[in-house]
Image: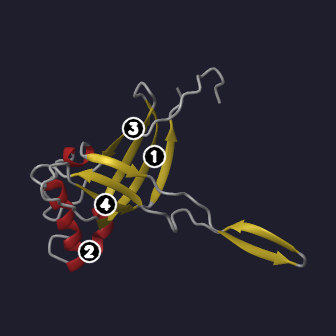
Amino acid sequence: MNNTLPMNRFHGDKWTIAFSNMPSVDQQKIDMRLFDLYVKNIVLPDFFVETANSEFMSESSRHSMSRTNDNLTQLTIEFKVDESMENYYDIYEWIQALRYHKDGINISKFKDNTIKSIDVFMLDNQKRTRGKLRFTNSIITNLGALTLNYGDSSEVTFACSFMYEEAKLIRQDG
């Protein structure tokens, strides 16, 4: 660790996100700006190690039993709904196609229909990238509810949950 750096704190609004792609029911190109630029907040998952206890005679020992990508917790992202609701509809159609095995999605090649990477860039106070957390081969597992309030003109949001194969933290030293 470099001891010449000032002790600044990381702030919750110093991040940005980039989706490599978004799956599509009709295999049409989706405007990624409707996802990259409409993220309201992100809940990064917990990272933990499962352990097992082994006992021998009068002693007990803990051992890691976690596999690389087993029992990962979900990534949750809240999106602002765009004016035409296109970002919500795109995910809704994808979820419905998976639930009801609709034409257009080859279930046997489900792995080919993932989001290849979701990159969450961590920024310093001058908005320089200090590192990123990359989630690979993500699938949308939940599309949250829309809350519509009569007489309230505030932004409408929805949350999505994602499962992923791997999460990698890539540090950038300054």
Q: Residue at x 55, y 57 (%)?
A: 47
- Indicate the quadrant where residue 136 lies: bottom left
The residue where tag 2 is placed is: 107
Q: Position of residue 45 (x, y in %)?
A: 47, 56
> Is disc 4 in contact with disc 2, using a CB cutoff of under 8 Å?
no
The image quadrant that residue 102 belongs to is bottom left
| Amino acid type of the residue tagged 2 in the rendering | Ile
Sequence order check, earlier mark of 4 and 1: 1
| Tag 1 secondary structure | strand
- Point out the tag, 2 or 1, that comes first from the N-terminus: 2
**Residue 160 percent coordinates (x, y):** 31, 60
Answer few, some or many: residues within 10 Å of disc 1's Cα (few below 14, many 20 plus, some between 14 and 19).
Answer: some
Quadrant of the rendered structure where residue 164 is?
Answer: bottom left
As drawn, is 83 to the left or to the right of 145? left
Q: Which badge, 3 or 1, comes first in the chain's sequence?
A: 3
What amino acid is labelled 3 in the image?
A: Asp
How far separated are the C-alphas under marks 2 and 1?
A: 28 Å
Q: Are marks 3 and 4 in contact (CB under 8 Å)?
A: no
Mark 2 vs mark 3: give the one in front.
3
* Spatial separation of the CA atoms under disc 4 and disc 1: 18 Å
Q: Position of residue 54 (x, y in %)?
A: 77, 75
Which mark is in front, 4 or 1?
A: 4
- Of labels 4 and 2, earlier in sequence is 2
How many badges with numbers are in the image?
4
Circle nearer the viewer, 3 or 1: 3
Assess disc 4: are there few (<14), some (14-19) or many (≥20) residues with their C-alpha within 10 Å of its C-alpha. Answer: some
Of the numbered discs in the image, which one, if any, rests on residue 160? 4
Whether 174 is drawn above or below 122: the answer is: above
Q: Amino acid at mark 1?
A: Leu
* Comes first in the chain, label 3 or label 4: 3
Residue for badge 1: 133
